[in-house]
Amino acid sequence: MSSSTIMSTGVELDALGLRIDGRPQLVLCASLFYFRLPREQWQARLEQVRASGYTCVDVYLPWNFHETAPGQWSFDGRRDVAAFLDLAHEAGLYVIARPGPYICSEWDGGALPAWLGLDPELRVRQNEPRFLAHVAAWFDQVLPMLVSRQYGAGGAVIMVQLENELDFFDCEDRTGYLTALRDQVVDHGITVPLIACAGQGDIAGATGDVPGVVPACNFYPNDDSPHIEAEVRRYARLLADRGLPLLITETNRRHRTLRRLLASGASLIAPYLQSSGWNFGYTPSSGNWGRPGNFMSHGYDFGGYVSSTGAERPEYAEAQVLARVVDALGSRLALATSSVPRVEVVSAFPTSSSPSALDLYGGGQLVAVPNLGETAGRAVVGGVSVAVAADSCPLMLVDLPLRDWGFDTTLTLASADLIDAEDGVLRFSSAVPVTVVLGGTRVEIPAPTSGAPEHMTVDGVDVVVLAPADVVRLAPTGQTAEVQELRAVRRRSGAAPTKPAGTHELPPTLESLGVYRGRGTYTATAELTGIDVLLLVGAADIVDLSIAGRVRPTIAGFGATRRIEVGEVTGRAEIHATVEIWGHANFDDARLPALKLGALRGLGGLWTVRSVQDLSALWTVEGHWAGTPKPLRNLGGWSSTRVGIPFTYTRSVETPTTSALCLQGVVEPVTVVVDGGEPIIVPAENPWVMLPAGTGQVSVTVPHHPSGGGLHAELLSLEPVTDWACAAQDDELLTAYAGHDGGSSTDVELPLVLKPGEEAWLDVELPATEGGFLLRLDGSQLRATGWASGECLGRVWVGDRPDFSGGDPDALWVPPGWSGVTLLIRGVDGPARPELRRLRLESPNN
């Protein structure tokens, strides 16, 4: 990137910061996602962001939310992104648009359509023609909406982001890939700055160093870390050397941290996720943040300043105070440069290891003094003792000329936030006493109480200190309404229809059956006489398996190979599986097969285990000081003082049929090579390798770990279970059935007890509401999907379940005005019997 100014349609980026129509701006930006909110709430949420003092929203545009099936596009109703962008403009907000093609966002597949994985030659997020052709089709749909709504064309869009955190992904040709995306966007007529964010600080990895693509940074530090400032200042300097500002496109939500980022040189601060929402329907992702076996919840809430239901939290008030500081300092702050304090700062409380300051435009410094402790304390700033509230980060002004405000003096020090300097009065906000030094006069003004600001004249200047509560306009929180128990419940007599999907020799993926969101069933019969174990390989996401009528515990292993004991079954047995897509992986985690970005869903492969052979012995050893002829040892049994040095163990195997090699005891990933082929990385989470018939030699490379327990190897000879009859139930079919009110039904008295694997469709009457409901299911061993007003709300899992991330995993949100609820509940085998004991409604105060 050259050091020249990035300027287009009135939006300029240079080393001094961000200008819009020539006005320097420090931009506070809140994430707000139209696809995670009812359309009826868009305007109120946008206005709420504006009332917080933030001036911008960033919004992803999920490709697979709009292309619902190959070539089928939808931009109506809750998908009307153009209407959302227009509402943002009307609310007086700027917009940073993030159309991907990949967005992450804990969203199904990171917004990459599931069917892309059906093409074995297509490689997602690569400079590859097949993928880029699909991206072009997406951009042809969405970019014209952004072009006509960009700044300078009568709209609010001031930046467009290409890709998202590409530095987390193994992209082979970053420069070529980003160049291709840039060219497509520019050819469509986007003229505002193009940005690409680095998720872990690799600027070149995120942007490919492509001209015309501005690097931005995402920071997610520990809020209590004393080292935040030093890291952020480094990136501010790196970008300033390129003639660019520091744009922080994602970060934590806590304003104590945001103040530290501001003081370290950020021109854009966009905490993720300030305004929370919901993962409606089948849109959550799975396997988040590199933790295998992790599901994203229906609630999408990481503690931002507005909850998923729209309630304002204490951080909302913190936002309003910080916004007042930004407004009060105006261009002095927007054109400031990153620095360190010119005066000594010493504190008696936990604080930054390297405090940051900004050299303000026109003179003076803004110095951030974070108190990372839980009690108030005192600091010495430039030789002056000042009070600092607990858990705070006041932005102190040092040596600030006041002539632009009409005062012929210099503010030597103010230990609190300056929120206004008009009408001949300096107004500060503080919860503790404020020290002001003006014209050689030092005073400490007492801490104000709400409704009673403190006033003092210092060296001829009127100084007013307000309590933070008198600065903000936080909506009243009220109390949560009394919980209501629902009793009007009816159970339908029928079941949802299925779409026959043919008979297949081996289990197909759900996507190949046209199910991109939803579920499918697989049925086969197998001769199990003399078979003790079945091997399930590659099953994802949620598999409910029954064998000879016996329902097994739900499998949610993201493709990890599973042994299934069937020694009690004899003769031919029916095998039936219901496989539900919770969501496609939004990250790229090689530890489990189904967590690879673009991985498909389905039953995988089911095999009968014909024999098991112990392969732990008779491996030759290659490595440090293992000579010729090669020694024979047990797998992992070579003795060496060279800890961590890799040793390779090799032995011959005989596999007349397809087989599976199980490596028990893997701690760190090992590398397996079969007959001299490509290396296979085998992690502890899935220590299996499938071997084709006729395999002759296997090599295992293991980092030497003398304190480990060693490795044990087994070879399982397999025969596939074949002739599968399949049926599909995609989300459209299930949603249509949920909205169908025909057929017979009966009243249900709770508790309702189900057998494992049994399903029940329940229609639930709701009372009238203006604020929406949280619907909670009290019970055990149940999965439930809810629908209302023709749309799938989401899913919850009650009882023994995998790990969940996000917001509240135990409630379904029924937005205001959405009538009735239909529930599909399914009994899950586990430590308790499947039972729905109560349905409760909570009415959050918004």
Image (cartoon, rainbow, N blue to C red):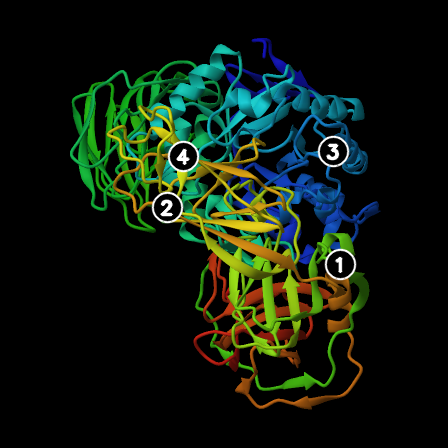
3 or 4: mark nearer the eye: 4
- Whichever of labels 2 and 4 marks the residue nearer the N terminus, that label is 4
Q: Position of residue 609 (x, y in %)?
A: 56, 61
Q: Is residue 599 above or below residue 94?
A: below
Rate crowding at label 4 as few (under 14), some (14 to 19) or many (20 or more) other CA atoms within 10 Å.
Answer: many
Based on the displayed image, in which of its 4 quarters is residue 153 positioned? top right
Mark number, residue 620: 4
Distance of mark 1 from mark 3, alpha carbons? 30 Å
Mark number, residue 131: 3
Q: Are marks 3 and 2 in contact (CB under 8 Å)?
A: no
2 or 4: mark nearer the eye: 4
Rate crowding at label 1 as few (under 14), some (14 to 19) or many (20 or more) other CA atoms within 10 Å.
Answer: few
The amino acid type, in three-letter code, at marker 4 is: Thr
Based on the displayed image, in which of its 4 quarters is residue 332 positioned? top left
Give SS at disc 3: helix
Give SS at disc 2: loop
Q: Residue at x 46, y 59 (%)?
A: 476
Distance of mark 2 from mark 4, alpha carbons? 14 Å
Give SS at disc 4: strand
3 or 2: mark nearer the eye: 2
Residue 404 is at least partly visible in this image = no
Q: Is residue 531 above or below residue 469?
A: below
Distance of mark 3 from mark 2, alpha carbons? 41 Å
